[in-house]
């Protein structure tokens, strides 16, 4: 009898991906909204929703919606029904975490990192750390959804690999996805850190904004674009690389990419640190620059304000092309506050047409968590719960659920 019940429930779940996707995407939070959004019959919606509720992947929350009669309880993904593993590879450290489906951190760790380590040693190190995090997370959140990585370098998202030049020598064209899939056998995502910070900023603070530009100004520089409410990557994933737009002049500085005159070579943290070092200060990174700014060193203040105007110059060109309604400035140098922001605003409002700036807001990021880490989680969840992939996710979930003990299944139920 138990096997027959299980088989019936599995068959019902096989067709429930569309319902799952509507709930996960926030398009339907009640039975009535599911009926309207899905176009399915009441019987079909009820059957598929009941199967999702019984599986523990969807739950009824304590929140209610008015329904003209008895209030109906809000439907949501059960955050405790699974976990994902994410990592943000920085220039000196790797931040790793196991997250639930909120996403919220269940467990985390930080590892030292050297760019000289190369991809094989680094991915082995990440894999070992992931094993420990997974062992901790799966005790309470049994289903392992997938892995998502953030890299501080240009990434071809479709292929999941680094494309040089980059700050990660030896990573070009390395099969990151293949290496991690061979070890963990789950979906793997790889994306540029600035794109992930853009996703996080949009999800956390500005979900209603359809057209937005996020600019990260740290030791390096880059930007991400939200267009029509979705991340815009361009044909090969290179959209938003404003740090390497070139301003040519007789004294154009050499950039880390090997070209002359890049915006990054004039206004990024490493470039300001270079100029401060030439003036006798000890500075190598964006953090060193901000430390000097916070000490109110006149040279640091002057250079940061000048960097803001340079960044404003290139942003004004972007505004004229994509016409965002919001620009968010993040990264370490954003801690310079109005000193940097005033320079950016000055150039943007000076150079752009009134139509483009009439309703334009330029603000500082207030996200204090690791934005790239959370962005990696949002990216994975959005893709796996998307209509085209939700049925496949349910197949994996149902297979994993029926391999577990009854006690483990009960832990996932709402």
Image (tube, rainbow, N blue to C red):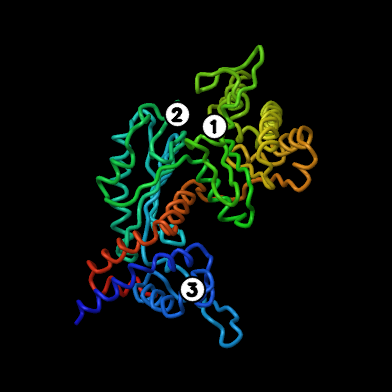
Q: Quadrant of residue 121?
A: top left
Could you say whether the residue bearing mark 2 is in a helix, strand or loop? loop
Give the position of the C terminus as an image quadrant. bottom left
**Sequence order check: which comes first, mark 2 or mark 3?**
3
Check the image and name the residue furthest to the bottom: 69
**Residue 149: image location, x then y, percent:** 40, 44
| Marks 1,2: beta carbons within 8 A | yes
Mark 2 lies on residue: 167
Residue under the image location 78 percent in, 45 percent down = 358
Instruction: Say if mark 2 contacts mark 3, CB within 8 Å.
Output: no
Say which quadrant the N terminus sits in: bottom left
Q: Is residue 272 visible?
A: no
The residue where tag 3 is placed is: 75
Q: Earlier in the sequence, mark 1 or mark 2?
A: 2
Q: Label 2 to label 3, Cα distance in Å?
A: 44 Å
* Left or right, residue 395 beside residue 258: left
Please tell me whether residue 277 is drawn above or below residue 180 in the rendered image.
above
**Quadrant of the image occupied by residue 250:** top right
Numbered mark located on residue 220 in the image = 1
* Label 2 neighbour load within 10 Å: few <14, some 14-19, many 20+: some
Q: Secondary structure at mark 1?
A: loop
Q: Relative to the observer, which residue lies in front, 71 or 387?
A: 387
Q: Is residue 371 left or right of residue 169?
A: right
Q: Nearer the viewer, mark 3 or mark 1?
A: 3
In the rendering, at what x and y percent does residue 343 appear? 73, 34
- CA gap between label 1 and label 2 equals 10 Å
User: Where in the figure is residue 57, as x and y percent of width and height?
Assistant: 38, 69
Tell me which residue sits at (72%, 47%) in the image: 361
Q: Which residue does the image show at 43% across and 75% down from the upper left?
A: 45
* Mark 1 nearby-residue class (10 Å; few <14, some 14–19, many ≥20): many
- Residue 153 percent across, percent down from the top left: 46, 34
């Amino acid at each position: 009898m138990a096997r027959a019940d299980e088989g019936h429930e599995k068959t019902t779940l096989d067709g429930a991906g569309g319902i799952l996707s509507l709930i996960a995407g926030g398009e339907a939070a009640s039975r009535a909204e599911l009926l309207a959004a899905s176009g399915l019959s009441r019987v079909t919606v009820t059957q598929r929703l009941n199967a999702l509720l019984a599986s523990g992947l969807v739950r009824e929350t304590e929140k209610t919606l008015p329904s003209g009669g008895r209030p109906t309880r809000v439907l949501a993904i059960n955050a405790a029904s699974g976990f994902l593993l994410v990592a943000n590879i920085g220039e000196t450290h790797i931040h790793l975490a196991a997250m639930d489906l909120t996403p919220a951190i269940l467990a985390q760790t930080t590892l030292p990192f050297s760019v000289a380590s190369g991809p094989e040693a680094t991915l082995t190190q990440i894999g070992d750390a992931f094993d420990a995090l997974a062992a901790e997370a799966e005790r309470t959140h049994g289903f392992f959804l997938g892995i998502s990585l953030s890299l501080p370098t240009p990434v071809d998202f479709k292929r999941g690999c680094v494309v040089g030049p980059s700050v990660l020598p030896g990573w070009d064209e390395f099969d990151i996805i293949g290496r991690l899939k061979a070890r963990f056998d789950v979906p793997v995502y790889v994306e540029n850190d600035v794109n992930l910070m853009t996703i996080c900023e949009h999800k956390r603070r500005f979900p209603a904004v359809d057209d937005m530009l996020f600019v990260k100004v740290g030791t390096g520089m880059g930007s991400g674009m939200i267009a029509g409410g979705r991340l815009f990557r361009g044909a090969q994933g290179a959209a938003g690389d404003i740090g390497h737009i070139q301003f040519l002049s007789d004294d154009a500085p050499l950039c880390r990419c090997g070209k002359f005159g890049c915006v990054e070579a004039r206004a990024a943290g490493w470039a300001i640190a270079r100029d401060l070092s030439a003036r006798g200060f000890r500075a190598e990174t964006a953090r060193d620059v901000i430390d000097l700014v916070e000490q109110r060193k006149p040279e640091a203040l002057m250079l940061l304000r000048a960097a803001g105007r340079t960044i404003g110059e290139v942003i004004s060109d972007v505004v004229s092309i994509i016409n965002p309604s919001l620009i968010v400035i993040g990264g370490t140098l954003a801690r310079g506050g109005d000193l940097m922001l005033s320079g950016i605003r000055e150039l943007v409002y000076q150079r752009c047409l009134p139509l483009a700036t009439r309703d334009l807001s330029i603000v500082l990021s207030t996200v204090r968590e690791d934005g790239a880490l959370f962005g990696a989680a949002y990216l994975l969840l959005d893709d796996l719960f998307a209509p085209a992939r939700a049925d496949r996710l349910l197949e994996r979930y149902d297979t994993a659920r029926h391999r577990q003990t009854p006690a483990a299944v009960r832990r996932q139920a709402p």
